[in-house]
Amino acid sequence: MLPLTMASQGEPMTIKKIGGKQETKKFLETLGFVVGGTVTVVSEINGNMIVNVKDSRVAIGKDMANKIMV
């Protein structure tokens, strides 16, 4: 298991765990980041990422990406 920030670009990964406080987990869940879901890194600039999740492109910061384990 590794944080999303360490994932390779273009490679679909399965979300294994989401860390952080309850409100953080709920926020990520509303964006489509759920355990067992698939996420693909589109691009990464200074740790901030654009990812494909549930047929949508989402931009997330480094702090949030570190809470998503794949």
Image: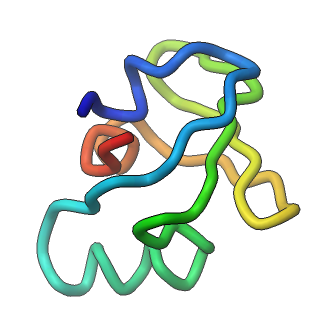
Along the line of sight, which residue is nearer the eye, 1 or 27? 1
**Residue beneath the point at 68% across and 37% down:** 40
Along the line of sight, which residue is nearer the eye, 23 or 29? 29
Along the line of sight, which residue is nearer the eye, 61 or 2? 2
**Residue beneath the point at 61% across and 73% down:** 32
Q: Is residue 2 above or below residue 13?
A: above
* Residue 49 occupies quadrant: top right
Q: How many marks?
A: 0
Q: Is residue 3 above or below residue 58?
A: above
* Residue 1 occupies quadrant: top left
Give the side of residue 35 with respect to residue 69, left or right.
right
Where is residue 37? Give x, y as percent.
57, 63
Q: Is residue 32 above or below residue 12?
A: below
Q: Is residue 60 above or below residue 17?
A: above
Where is residue 15? Give x, y as percent.
44, 53
Give the side of residue 3 with respect to residue 46, left or right.
left
* Residue 6 occupies quadrant: top left
> Given the current orientation, which residue lies at the most extreme left position?
21
**Residue beneath the point at 40% across and 25% down:** 5
Q: Quadrant of the C terminus?
A: top left
Give the side of residue 46 with respect to residue 26, left or right.
right
Where is residue 35? Give x, y as percent.
41, 68
Q: How is the image coloured?
A: rainbow
